[in-house]
Image (tube, grey):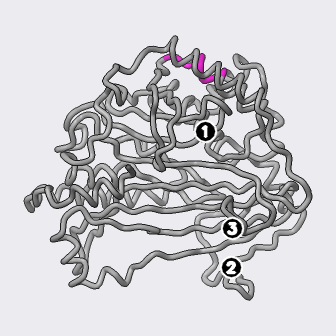
Amino acid sequence: MDDITLVRQLRAEVAEPDSATLHRMRNNVVAGLRDGSSSRPARSGLGVRLLAAFRHRRPAVRFGLVAAAVAAVVASTIVVDAVTTPDGRPVVGHAAAAAELRRAAAAAIRVSDQPLQPGQFYYLRTVAVAGNSIGGGPCGGLFYLRKDVYETWVPKAWEEQWMQRRVDEAERQFFRPSDEARANQCQLHALSASTEVRKAPAGLFYPEGLHRPAKEPQDGTGAVVYDLSPEEVTRRLAAGNWQSPTPQFMAGLPRDPKQLLERIYRDSKGQWDSHDDEAFLFVRDVLRSGVVPADLRAALFSAAALIPGVRLVSDSVNLEGRHGVAVAMSDEGKTRVEMIFDPETGDVIGEREVLLTPNHIEGVPAGTAVAYTAVSRQVVGAMGATAKN
C-alpha cells in the first residue's frame, strides 16, 4: 500500500488542528520554502537533505520541513515505522550494515550494467511523495500530499541530447474532507498537475546561475531546448561533482574503498555538523543519480561500510512497494535517513526519512516517515520511450 492510498483510506479519522497549531506549521513550512532557493539544504532543522537531490539535472526536491508540517496534521495515521523493522525487530548495528553493504558491492560487480547500443537510452525514473502547504490567499492553511515524477533519458554519448520529463503534482490527496471542500471553494483545482519537458546535451537542462531567461527557448512540441556549444558542454562536463556526476568526475574517483572514503571526507568537509552524516549523504547523492557504473557503485558501497554509525534496517520498502535492504544514519539521533538498495543487483531503489524522537517536529510521534522516493533505471530503445513501451 502506498502513501496516497493510505491517506485516502484514513483521512476521515483525522481531527481538525486548532488555529494555533496551523499557525505554527504554516510558519515552519514558509521558512522551509524560503530555503528551497539555496543550492544546498539548510544546516538546521529536520533532515531536509533527504531529497536535496536532482540538483542541476533534476530540480531540487526538499521534503523535510514541508513534509514534517503535514505529518503534524496526520501523524496519527501515517506512522509506518516505529524505530524497529516492520516485523518488530530493532534496527541492528554497524557490523550487520557493513556486511550488507559488502554484499551489495559484490552484487554490483557480479551483475554487469547493460551496455547501451547506438540509439538506446538509460531511462531513469524517480517518484517522490511529500507534503505541500499553501501559505496565503483564499486557500491559505491547506495541507496535502503531493506526488512528483521525474523521468530522464540518458544517451550512450553524454555530449548528445538528453531529455527530461517532469510532472509536478502527478497526484494530490487531501488529509481531511473539510480541506478538500475548502480547496473546491477557493478553486485550488486550477493548480492541476503540470508537465514540463526539457532537452539539452549532457543533461544540462538549466542555465548556469540562479535565474532562468525570461523566455526559455522551445521547439515545436513546446519542450524547452538548450543547444550549448561543444566548448560549453566540455567545460561543464569537466565540472562534475558528487551531486551532478559526470563521466570525467566518476573516472577520477578511487576504486579502493578506503581511498574513496578519504576523498568523500575531504570533499564533504564543513558541509554539515556531522562529518559521518555528510559522508553518507555524499554517497547517497552520487548513487541516486542512476548513472554510476558498476565498479564505482561497488566501491561506494564498500566505502559506506566503513562509515561509523551506519546501521541496518532490514526489509525496507520504497515508495512503490518494492522491497530491499536499507542502511541508515541517524541525524544526531533525531531522524533516520535510509538508503534502500536491491541486494541482488546493488542498485539503489529509493530513500526515506523517519523521525526517531517524539516532538522533534511538534506533535509528530517517533516512527513517522516524512519522505519517500522510488528510483529505477532501465534500457529503452528511443528517447521518450518508457519501460512499458
Q: CA distance from mark 2 to mark 1?
A: 29 Å
Residue 319 vertical placement versus 179 (above, below): above
Q: CA distance from mark 2 to mark 3?
A: 15 Å
Q: Which mark is residue 223?
A: 2
Q: Position of residue 327 (x, y in %)?
A: 50, 27
The type of residue carrying mark 3 is: Pro
Q: Position of residue 3 (x, y in %)?
A: 36, 52
Identity of the residue furthest to the top in this view: 95
Q: Position of residue 40 (x, y in %)?
A: 52, 48
Q: Which residue is mark 3?
A: 207
Q: Residue at x 25, y 77 (%)?
A: 183
Are the residues at dot 2 and dot 3 in contact (C-beta closer than 8 Å)?
no
Q: Residue at x 10, y 60 (%)?
A: 16
- Magenta residues (range): 302-308
Neighbor class of circle 3 (other Cα within 10 Å; few <14, some 14-19, many 20+) is: few
The type of residue carrying mark 2 is: Ala
Neighbor class of circle 2 (other Cα within 10 Å; few <14, some 14-19, many 20+) is: some
